[in-house]
Image (cartoon, rainbow, N blue to C red):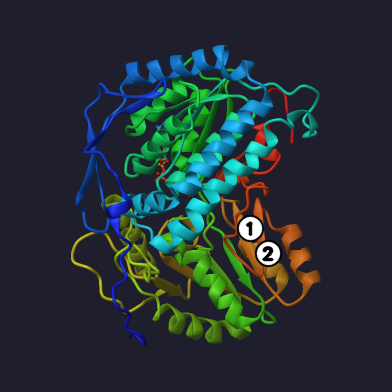
């Protein structure tokens, strides 16, 4: 049911200046790849956007060699102050080209333009500004006297926040004095390649950042390359495990940012309207393709019916459709494979006995879509309570006492994030203290800031990105 009809308000793609095909970005230039090229498509229309080069083992080798040369000849010789100037320049260019980057991100990823425009791209700029400020202050970061860069960092990122994950990786690595070879996800390479143009515009010395596109095998080659000093990976727990095995016994430093199954805990004294907004933001932001999504709602039994009713009413007002339309709340699922996984887990949820409710919205004929869905009557043993769906699917569980809420919240192999909604500050602090999660939000959800460290416990990985702590992953001998 739709209460309001909105006229279409599509953001223009005229701001884009896309090429028909993109090469690899190695040693400051776009070069041909020797693997078989692949296409990147819009998940909202399934239409071709551009042809993308695929990096073979030799191409990865070339990129690592370029990064090593740049590290030895230029970047490690440069003062922190000068490195900082490059980072400031990149941040300003991201701001200048913000609209173009937002449109490209929504086109390639399927996320609503209001999110890429108001969340992803501004955060990308803020990450570069923040770490630009650290580049000449490493001696004062409390990380030991004369902290030293590691050398060449290999970085592998997922498709859910393509440009933001690139910023989380590249900004601290460069600020700490490392050079980089980065591999974007195969379904979302576009903004990384536009970012490479920004690096040319910023006159960043050749080889300091290299971008190799390709599938998982390209990432695997990068992980195993003997001349890489550090691997930073964001992606699934399964691939994270494989990488940990490959790196074990080498001198490579490793950070892993993996999956999650966060509990969003709502106590009966919480401001319900705000909590409902927070629940929606927690799981339906970016179609639920968020590692720290509040995918398990733990609601106190006495307010369960009221919260679920209000949630359904609110979800009925969300608009699903064209990611480039400024009124869109729910965009496209990033790929056919991800859609199949969401459908499979949702069907299992139903088969296991949970009650499924789906918002009544029209699904476009082309593209990959999944309407916002809630499961009630979920039990801790259900797959939808345990597995990461990575889609717009919320599992609702109940609790009676704070102790039960804590036990249920911690009953997961993951430990990335959590949310607590209560009017009582003392209760929030007491519960937060006992939750095994790297990031805990109180009376809000999915807030990010470059000065705030982010990372997980248990199968959500190790190491922290963001803040002063984020520098330690890129410095020799530094401990947070
Ligand atoms: P994925 O693990 O399949 O892929 C991530 C990246 O790794 C891609 O670039 C992919 O090409 C590459 N890759 C695949 N196989 C590889 C291998 N064997 N060796 C090296 N690289 C390989 O994950 P995905 O489906 O793209 O992303 C979704 C996952 O990422 C979710 O589980 C989500 O929770 C997680 N994620 C975590 C965070 C975090 O900060 N903790 C942030 C975003 C996403």
Crowding near the residue tagged with mark 1, few <14, some 14–19, many ≥20 C-alpha atoms within 10 Å:
some
- CB-based contact (under 8 Å), mark 2 and mark 1: yes
In three-dimensional space, the C-alpha distance between marks 2 and 1, rounded to whole angstroms, equals 6 Å
Observer-nearest of 204 and 190: 204
Q: Which residue is mark 2?
A: 406
The answer to whether residue 308 is above or below residue 213 is below
Q: Residue 177: name its quadrant.
A: top right
The answer to whether residue 71 is above or below residue 411 is above
The answer to whether residue 93 is above or below residue 406 is above
Q: Which residue is mark 1?
A: 410
> In x, y percent, where is residue 266?
63, 74
Q: Residue 255: name its quadrant.
A: top right
Left or right, 33 with reference to 71? left
Observer-nearest of 61 and 92: 92
Q: Is mark 1 within 8 Å of ligand 1?
A: no
> In x, y percent, where is residue 137?
74, 32
């Amino acid at each position: 049911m739709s209460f309001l009809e909105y006229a279409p308000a599509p953001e223009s793609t005229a701001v884009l200046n896309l090429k028909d095909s993109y090469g690899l970005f190695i040693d400051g230039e776009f070069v041909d790849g020797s693997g078989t090229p692949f296409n990147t498509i819009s998940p909202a229309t399934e239409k071709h956007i551009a042809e993308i080069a695929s990096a073979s083992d030799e191409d990865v080798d070339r990129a690592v060699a370029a990064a090593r040369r740049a590290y030895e000849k230029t970047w490690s010789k440069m003062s922190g102050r000068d490195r900082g100037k490059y980072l400031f320049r990149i941040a300003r260019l991201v701001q200048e080209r913000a609209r173009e980057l937002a449109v490209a991100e929504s086109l390639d990823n399927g996320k609503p333009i209001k999110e890429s425009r108001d969340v992803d791209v501004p955060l990308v700029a803020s990450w570069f500004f923040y770490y630009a400020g650290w580049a000449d202050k490493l001696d004062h970061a409390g990380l030991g006297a004369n902290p030293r860069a590691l050398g060449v960092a290999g970085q592998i990122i997922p498709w859910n926040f393509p440009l933001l994950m690139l910023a989380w990786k590249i900004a601290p690595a460069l600020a700490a004095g490392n050079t980089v070879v980065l591999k974007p996800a195969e379904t979302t390479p576009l903004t990384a390649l536009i970012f490479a143009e920004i690096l040319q515009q910023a006159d960043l010395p050749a080889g300091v950042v290299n971008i190799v596109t390709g599938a998982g095998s390209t990432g695997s080659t990068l992980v195993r390359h003997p001349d890489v000093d550090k691997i930073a990976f964001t992606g699934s727990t399964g691939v994270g495990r494989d990488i940990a095995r490959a790196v074990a016994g080498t001198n490579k430093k490793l950070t892993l940012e993996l999956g999650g199954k966060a509990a969003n805990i709502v106590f009966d004294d919480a401001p319900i309207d705000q909590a409902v907004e927070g629940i929606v933001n927690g799981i339906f932001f970016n179609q639920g393709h968020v590692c720290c999504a509040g995918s398990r709602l733990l609601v106190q039994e006495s307010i369960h019916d009221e919260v679920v009713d209000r949630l359904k009413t609110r979800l009925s007002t969300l608009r699903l459709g064209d990611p480039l339309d400024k009124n869109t709340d729910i965009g496209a699922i990033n790929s056919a494979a991800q859609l199949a996984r969401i459908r499979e887990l949702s069907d299992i949820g139903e088969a296991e006995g949970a009650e499924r409710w789906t918002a009544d919205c029209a699904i476009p004929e082309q593209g990959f879509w999944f309407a916002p869905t809630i499961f009630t009557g979920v039990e801790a043993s259900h797959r939808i309570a345990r597995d990461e769906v990575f889609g717009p699917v919320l599992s609702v569980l109940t609790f009676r006492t704070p102790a039960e809420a804590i036990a249920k919240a911690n009953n997961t192999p993951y430990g990335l994030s959590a949310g607590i909604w209560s009017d009582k500050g003392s209760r929030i602090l007491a519960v937060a203290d006992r939750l095994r999660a790297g990031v805990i939000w109180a009376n809000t959800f999915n807030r990010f800031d470059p000065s705030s460290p982010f990372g997980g416990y248990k199968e959500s990985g190790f190491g922290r990105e963001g803040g002063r702590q984020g520098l330690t992953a890129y410095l020799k001998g530094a401990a947070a």
